[in-house]
Amino acid sequence: MRLRLAIGAAGVVTVLATIATTVATLAVTDASAAESRSAARLETQRAAATTWSASFEGFPGAAWKSSWGVVSGGQFGFDRMFAMTGGGLLVRYGAGSSAPSCTNCPTEGGGQFYTNVPSLATSRTVSLKYQLKFPVGHDFGRGGKLPGLYGGSPGEASGGNHGNAWSTRFMWRNGNQGEVYFYSPDEEGYGRDLGLGSWSYPADDAYHTIEQFVDRTSQTITVWFDGRQVFTTTVSGISAIDVSGIFFSTFYGGHSTEWGPAVASEARFKNFSLSTAVQH
């Protein structure tokens, strides 16, 4: 009798172990299936996305402006931006330069233009991705602007203006720390700093990829740097304002020479693309 009970207990243990293994296997299988379904949905979204891309070939000629949808207002610095072989753009910044509004700057630097991409206007989501490169030893000064997205009319979401528009330019501050510099009708003063220090821009003479995804329905902004998500936040004031396009804006500042580099500097940009889906 005791022998039969021992055998019975061992059998129970074996059955329980088998059940546990089966449950664990099913859980792993289910998780893998869920991950596969999620990846498939993402690929479907990407395949169905409205996309746009263009290079700097022909910059700053009429054909190039047409391909980018460049609008006439809010431009400066085309004499400091130069097309490169391979479709990139070189931007130069003078020593001590800052925004065009600077009154004590010994030199000028950077450049700016707005684009309009009508196919994206009513999209609830939009992604901007591009690559940028700073040379080894780059002097970041106190901070500076980098391209982002905007909605509404040019000039109504920058320079302290808060019209019926929004913008999500990137910046560097406090050395090479990254952030989103945000404007919307709900804000006041100059732009609001979002996520300062969540990533950094290497000065290593290598291209790095940055992407921002704006969801106007949830009013969120998410950032990836070199394919890794580094920041996400919720904002307000953007849900009812159509997407316009790229706000290409890069200069030191701020509005005074204290923001600028001690010596003349430069940055390179290439591979700009827009999509209604996440791109990385």
Image (cartoon, helix red, strand yellow):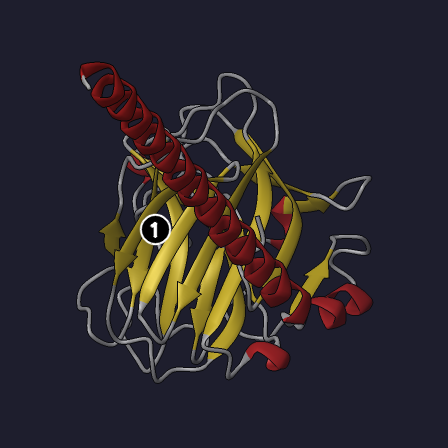
Say which residue appears at 79% left-offset and 69% top-offset.
Answer: 62
What is the quadrant of residue 92 in the picture?
Answer: top right
Number of numbered discs on residues: 1
Q: Position of residue 59 (x, y in %)?
A: 75, 55
Compared to residue 204, the image places residue 116 above or below, namely below
Closer to the camera, 113 or 29?
Answer: 29
Closer to the camera, 116 or 33?
Answer: 33
Q: Position of residue 17 (x, y in %)?
A: 34, 28
Q: Position of residue 220 (x, y in %)?
A: 32, 63
Compared to residue 200, the image places residue 229 above or below, namely below
Q: Position of residue 82 (x, y in %)?
A: 70, 45
Say which residue appears at 52% left-offset and 61% top-offset.
Answer: 127
Q: Is residue 98 visible?
A: no
Say which residue appears at 30% left-offset and 80% top-offset.
Answer: 163
Left or right of 21: which side holds 63? Answer: right
Left or right of 249: which side holds 47? Answer: right
What is the quadrant of residue 257 in the picture?
Answer: top left
- Label 1: which residue? 180
Q: Quadrant of the N terminus?
A: top left
Q: Secondary structure at mark 1?
A: strand
| Amino acid type at mark 1 | Val
Left or right of 215: which side holds 270? Answer: right
Find the residue positioned furthest to the front.
1
Q: Is residue 1 visible?
A: yes
Say which residue appears at 64% left-offset and 57% top-offset.
Answer: 273
For disc 1, the neighbor class at 10 Å (few under 14, some 14 to 19, many from 20) is: many
